Image (tube, helix red, strand yellow):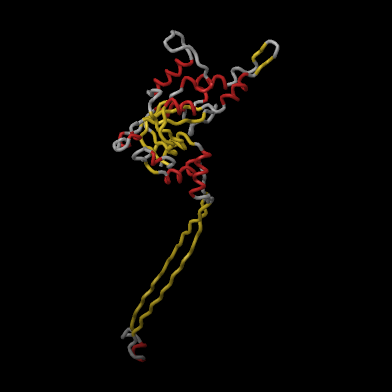
Amino acid sequence: MFNLYYLNYTKAFEIAMQIDNKVLEKQTKERNFEGSADLNASGETPEISLLSKILPKLNADISVHGSKATRAEDTLKVVSTKSTILNPVIQKSVEVRKLGIEQVGKLLKIRDVSLKIANQQDISGTKILLSGLLKDIPVDGLGQMDFGALFNVFLKDASYIVSGKLPEKVNKDRRDSENSTDRLLFKIPMQMEQEMENSYSISDLEIGPVTLIGIYRGIFKYKDIRKKIDIISQMQTEKEPIDIDVETDEEQDNKSDSLAELGPDDDVHYIDVIAIIQELF
Protein backbone atom coordinates (compact mmCIF):
# COMPACT_ATOMS: atom_id res chain seq x y z
CA MET A 1 0.00 0.00 0.00
CA PHE A 2 1.08 3.55 -0.61
CA ASN A 3 -0.04 7.14 -0.26
CA LEU A 4 0.19 9.15 -3.48
CA TYR A 5 1.79 12.62 -3.44
CA TYR A 6 2.52 13.25 -7.11
CA LEU A 7 1.81 11.36 -10.32
CA ASN A 8 2.63 12.07 -13.94
CA TYR A 9 -0.41 10.14 -15.11
CA THR A 10 0.47 10.17 -18.81
CA LYS A 11 3.87 8.55 -18.22
CA ALA A 12 2.50 6.06 -15.70
CA PHE A 13 -0.38 5.03 -17.99
CA GLU A 14 1.87 4.45 -21.00
CA ILE A 15 4.31 2.30 -19.01
CA ALA A 16 1.45 0.37 -17.37
CA MET A 17 -0.03 -0.39 -20.81
CA GLN A 18 3.33 -1.74 -21.97
CA ILE A 19 3.43 -4.04 -18.96
CA ASP A 20 -0.14 -5.27 -19.53
CA ASN A 21 -2.57 -3.52 -21.87
CA LYS A 22 -5.58 -5.39 -20.53
CA VAL A 23 -7.61 -3.27 -18.15
CA LEU A 24 -9.70 -5.31 -15.71
CA GLU A 25 -13.32 -4.13 -15.67
CA LYS A 26 -15.08 -6.73 -13.53
CA GLN A 27 -14.51 -9.88 -11.52
CA THR A 28 -16.82 -12.86 -11.04
CA LYS A 29 -16.60 -14.73 -7.78
CA GLU A 30 -18.20 -18.17 -7.56
CA ARG A 31 -19.58 -19.62 -4.35
CA ASN A 32 -20.40 -23.34 -4.02
CA PHE A 33 -22.59 -24.83 -1.32
CA GLU A 34 -22.64 -28.63 -0.79
CA GLY A 35 -24.63 -30.66 1.68
CA SER A 36 -25.01 -34.39 2.41
CA ALA A 37 -27.04 -36.58 4.74
CA ASP A 38 -26.58 -40.20 5.86
CA LEU A 39 -29.22 -42.29 7.57
CA ASN A 40 -28.44 -45.73 9.02
CA ALA A 41 -30.91 -47.94 10.77
CA SER A 42 -30.95 -51.57 11.89
CA GLY A 43 -33.38 -53.75 13.75
CA GLU A 44 -34.75 -57.24 14.37
CA THR A 45 -38.13 -58.75 14.97
CA PRO A 46 -39.04 -58.62 18.64
CA GLU A 47 -39.39 -62.09 20.09
CA ILE A 48 -42.55 -61.25 21.95
CA SER A 49 -44.46 -60.14 18.94
CA LEU A 50 -46.94 -62.27 17.07
CA LEU A 51 -44.82 -61.93 13.95
CA SER A 52 -41.86 -63.61 15.64
CA LYS A 53 -43.99 -66.65 16.27
CA ILE A 54 -45.04 -66.93 12.66
CA LEU A 55 -41.83 -65.81 10.81
CA PRO A 56 -38.23 -66.63 11.47
CA LYS A 57 -36.15 -64.07 13.30
CA LEU A 58 -35.29 -61.18 10.95
CA ASN A 59 -32.36 -58.71 10.92
CA ALA A 60 -32.45 -55.57 8.75
CA ASP A 61 -29.88 -52.84 7.96
CA ILE A 62 -31.11 -49.70 6.19
CA SER A 63 -28.73 -47.08 4.81
CA VAL A 64 -29.80 -43.87 3.03
CA HIS A 65 -27.37 -41.34 1.47
CA GLY A 66 -28.25 -37.96 0.05
CA SER A 67 -26.36 -34.85 -1.20
CA LYS A 68 -27.22 -31.41 -2.58
CA ALA A 69 -25.04 -28.77 -4.27
CA THR A 70 -25.86 -25.17 -5.16
CA ARG A 71 -23.77 -22.51 -6.92
CA ALA A 72 -23.97 -18.71 -6.77
CA GLU A 73 -22.01 -16.07 -8.69
CA ASP A 74 -21.10 -12.59 -7.42
CA THR A 75 -20.11 -9.99 -10.00
CA LEU A 76 -17.75 -7.37 -8.57
CA LYS A 77 -17.16 -4.02 -10.26
CA VAL A 78 -13.47 -3.13 -10.48
CA VAL A 79 -12.80 0.55 -9.74
CA SER A 80 -9.88 1.94 -11.76
CA THR A 81 -7.99 4.76 -10.04
CA LYS A 82 -4.64 6.47 -10.50
CA SER A 83 -3.20 4.21 -7.84
CA THR A 84 -4.29 1.03 -9.65
CA ILE A 85 -2.66 2.32 -12.85
CA LEU A 86 0.53 3.16 -10.97
CA ASN A 87 0.72 -0.09 -9.00
CA PRO A 88 2.08 -2.32 -11.85
CA VAL A 89 4.68 0.39 -12.60
CA ILE A 90 5.83 0.27 -8.97
CA GLN A 91 5.93 -3.53 -9.06
CA LYS A 92 8.05 -3.42 -12.22
CA SER A 93 10.51 -0.87 -10.81
CA VAL A 94 13.77 -2.00 -9.22
CA GLU A 95 14.85 -0.67 -5.84
CA VAL A 96 18.11 1.15 -6.33
CA ARG A 97 21.24 0.17 -4.43
CA LYS A 98 23.72 2.08 -6.54
CA LEU A 99 23.49 4.80 -9.18
CA GLY A 100 25.92 4.75 -12.10
CA ILE A 101 26.13 4.56 -15.85
CA GLU A 102 24.79 1.00 -15.88
CA GLN A 103 21.47 2.20 -14.42
CA VAL A 104 20.79 4.83 -17.12
CA GLY A 105 17.39 4.18 -18.70
CA LYS A 106 16.20 1.84 -15.96
CA LEU A 107 12.90 2.16 -14.10
CA LEU A 108 13.96 2.66 -10.49
CA LYS A 109 12.44 2.98 -7.05
CA ILE A 110 14.41 5.09 -4.55
CA ARG A 111 13.25 4.90 -0.94
CA ASP A 112 13.83 7.35 1.93
CA VAL A 113 14.71 10.44 -0.11
CA SER A 114 14.62 13.88 1.54
CA LEU A 115 13.54 16.68 -0.82
CA LYS A 116 13.91 20.46 -1.11
CA ILE A 117 12.33 22.90 -3.59
CA ALA A 118 15.27 24.67 -5.25
CA ASN A 119 13.42 27.48 -7.06
CA GLN A 120 10.61 28.30 -4.64
CA GLN A 121 11.04 32.08 -4.97
CA ASP A 122 10.96 32.02 -8.76
CA ILE A 123 7.85 29.85 -8.79
CA SER A 124 6.03 32.12 -6.35
CA GLY A 125 6.56 35.09 -8.64
CA THR A 126 5.54 33.07 -11.69
CA LYS A 127 2.27 32.03 -10.11
CA ILE A 128 1.43 35.66 -9.41
CA LEU A 129 1.98 36.47 -13.09
CA LEU A 130 -0.23 33.58 -14.19
CA SER A 131 -2.97 34.11 -11.62
CA GLY A 132 -4.86 36.71 -13.65
CA LEU A 133 -3.66 39.63 -11.52
CA LEU A 134 -2.31 41.40 -14.61
CA LYS A 135 -5.44 40.98 -16.69
CA ASP A 136 -7.03 44.07 -18.30
CA ILE A 137 -4.18 46.47 -17.56
CA PRO A 138 -4.70 49.83 -19.32
CA VAL A 139 -1.87 50.77 -21.68
CA ASP A 140 -1.69 54.13 -23.45
CA GLY A 141 -2.48 53.74 -27.12
CA LEU A 142 -3.27 50.03 -26.80
CA GLY A 143 -6.25 49.92 -24.47
CA GLN A 144 -6.76 47.01 -22.07
CA MET A 145 -3.96 44.43 -22.18
CA ASP A 146 -4.00 40.93 -20.75
CA PHE A 147 -0.41 40.50 -19.64
CA GLY A 148 -1.31 37.26 -17.87
CA ALA A 149 -2.10 35.59 -21.19
CA LEU A 150 1.18 36.91 -22.59
CA PHE A 151 3.19 35.52 -19.70
CA ASN A 152 1.33 32.22 -19.98
CA VAL A 153 2.82 31.72 -23.46
CA PHE A 154 6.36 32.10 -22.14
CA LEU A 155 5.90 30.36 -18.80
CA LYS A 156 3.71 27.39 -19.77
CA ASP A 157 6.71 25.06 -19.44
CA ALA A 158 7.74 26.37 -16.01
CA SER A 159 8.54 23.67 -13.47
CA TYR A 160 9.40 23.15 -9.84
CA ILE A 161 13.06 22.19 -9.58
CA VAL A 162 13.39 19.71 -6.72
CA SER A 163 16.66 18.53 -5.23
CA GLY A 164 17.07 15.54 -2.98
CA LYS A 165 19.55 13.59 -0.94
CA LEU A 166 19.93 9.86 -1.36
CA PRO A 167 19.81 7.63 1.73
CA GLU A 168 23.04 6.23 3.11
CA LYS A 169 22.25 2.69 1.94
CA VAL A 170 22.51 3.79 -1.70
CA ASN A 171 25.96 5.27 -1.21
CA LYS A 172 27.73 2.43 0.60
CA ASP A 173 29.16 0.93 -2.59
CA ARG A 174 31.36 3.53 -4.29
CA ARG A 175 33.51 1.42 -6.56
CA ASP A 176 33.53 3.95 -9.41
CA SER A 177 33.91 7.71 -9.59
CA GLU A 178 30.45 8.16 -11.12
CA ASN A 179 28.85 7.23 -7.83
CA SER A 180 30.62 10.00 -5.92
CA THR A 181 27.57 12.20 -5.31
CA ASP A 182 24.56 11.61 -3.10
CA ARG A 183 22.48 14.44 -4.59
CA LEU A 184 19.68 14.10 -7.15
CA LEU A 185 17.50 16.49 -9.12
CA PHE A 186 14.18 16.33 -10.93
CA LYS A 187 11.38 18.62 -12.06
CA ILE A 188 7.61 18.74 -11.59
CA PRO A 189 5.64 20.73 -14.22
CA MET A 190 3.96 23.74 -12.68
CA GLN A 191 0.18 24.03 -12.91
CA MET A 192 -2.16 26.55 -11.37
CA GLU A 193 -4.38 23.80 -9.94
CA GLN A 194 -4.04 20.13 -8.99
CA GLU A 195 -0.28 19.94 -9.21
CA MET A 196 -0.25 17.30 -6.50
CA GLU A 197 -2.55 14.40 -5.69
CA ASN A 198 -4.89 13.99 -2.72
CA SER A 199 -4.96 17.72 -1.88
CA TYR A 200 -1.23 17.83 -1.08
CA SER A 201 0.80 20.93 -1.88
CA ILE A 202 4.31 21.11 -3.28
CA SER A 203 5.67 22.07 0.16
CA ASP A 204 4.44 18.75 1.59
CA LEU A 205 7.28 17.05 -0.29
CA GLU A 206 9.74 18.70 2.09
CA ILE A 207 8.18 17.05 5.15
CA GLY A 208 9.89 13.75 5.79
CA PRO A 209 11.42 11.16 3.44
CA VAL A 210 9.46 9.88 0.43
CA THR A 211 9.83 7.22 -2.26
CA LEU A 212 10.57 8.19 -5.87
CA ILE A 213 9.51 6.18 -8.90
CA GLY A 214 11.24 7.24 -12.11
CA ILE A 215 13.69 6.67 -14.94
CA TYR A 216 17.36 7.33 -14.26
CA ARG A 217 18.93 9.70 -16.81
CA GLY A 218 22.51 9.98 -15.56
CA ILE A 219 24.88 12.42 -13.83
CA PHE A 220 25.06 16.11 -14.79
CA LYS A 221 26.57 19.30 -13.46
CA TYR A 222 23.96 21.18 -11.46
CA LYS A 223 24.38 24.37 -13.50
CA ASP A 224 24.10 22.47 -16.80
CA ILE A 225 20.94 20.53 -16.00
CA ARG A 226 19.37 23.60 -14.41
CA LYS A 227 19.80 25.51 -17.69
CA LYS A 228 18.07 22.70 -19.58
CA ILE A 229 15.03 22.20 -17.36
CA ASP A 230 14.47 25.60 -15.71
CA ILE A 231 12.57 27.78 -18.21
CA ILE A 232 12.38 30.65 -15.71
CA SER A 233 16.16 30.70 -15.37
CA GLN A 234 16.48 30.72 -19.16
CA MET A 235 14.28 33.84 -19.40
CA GLN A 236 16.30 35.81 -16.89
CA THR A 237 18.66 38.38 -18.36
CA GLU A 238 22.17 38.82 -17.06
CA LYS A 239 22.53 41.66 -14.57
CA GLU A 240 25.40 43.32 -12.75
CA PRO A 241 28.03 41.15 -11.02
CA ILE A 242 27.06 39.71 -7.66
CA ASP A 243 29.58 41.78 -5.68
CA ILE A 244 27.60 44.99 -6.38
CA ASP A 245 25.22 45.77 -3.54
CA VAL A 246 22.10 45.55 -5.69
CA GLU A 247 19.37 42.91 -5.53
CA THR A 248 19.31 41.24 -8.95
CA ASP A 249 17.82 38.17 -10.55
CA GLU A 250 21.23 36.54 -10.39
CA GLU A 251 21.33 37.06 -6.64
CA GLN A 252 17.90 35.45 -6.36
CA ASP A 253 19.18 32.48 -8.32
CA ASN A 254 22.11 32.17 -5.91
CA LYS A 255 19.62 32.16 -3.03
CA SER A 256 17.84 29.31 -4.73
CA ASP A 257 21.15 27.46 -5.00
CA SER A 258 21.75 27.95 -1.29
CA LEU A 259 18.30 26.62 -0.53
CA ALA A 260 19.12 23.54 -2.56
CA GLU A 261 22.54 23.30 -0.87
CA LEU A 262 24.10 22.73 -4.27
CA GLY A 263 26.92 24.57 -5.98
CA PRO A 264 26.93 25.25 -9.74
CA ASP A 265 29.68 22.68 -10.36
CA ASP A 266 28.25 19.97 -8.10
CA ASP A 267 27.27 16.67 -9.70
CA VAL A 268 23.65 15.54 -9.44
CA HIS A 269 21.77 12.40 -10.47
CA TYR A 270 18.89 13.43 -12.73
CA ILE A 271 15.64 11.45 -12.41
CA ASP A 272 12.75 11.56 -14.86
CA VAL A 273 10.14 11.28 -12.12
CA ILE A 274 6.90 9.37 -12.69
CA ALA A 275 5.51 9.38 -9.16
CA ILE A 276 6.27 10.38 -5.58
CA ILE A 277 4.70 8.18 -2.93
CA GLN A 278 4.83 7.36 0.74
CA GLU A 279 4.82 3.64 1.33
CA LEU A 280 2.49 2.34 4.02
CA PHE A 281 3.41 -0.63 6.18
Image location of residue 192, percent across then percent down: 55, 26
Q: Tally the marks.
A: 0
Pick the front one: 53 or 258? 258
Identify the residue shown where x is 56% and y is 24%.
155
Whether 214 is drawn above or below 67: the answer is above
Left or right: where does residue 157 sit relative to residue 222? right
Of all residues, the one furthest to the front in this rendering is: 177
Which quadrant, please, contains the N terminus? top left
Image quadrant where one finds the C terminus: top left
- Residue 134 picture location, percent across and down: 60, 17
Residue 181 placed where, x, y %? 34, 31
Task: Give the answer, above or below, for where 239 lies relative to 220.
Answer: above
- Image: 162 above or below 111: above
| Residue at left offset 50%, top offset 50% | 20
Which x, y percent locates residue 126? Answer: 53, 21
Horizontal side of 124 relative to 56 (left or right) equals: right
Relative depth, front residue between 209 and 165: 165
| Residue name at image x 49 percent, y 13 percent | 239
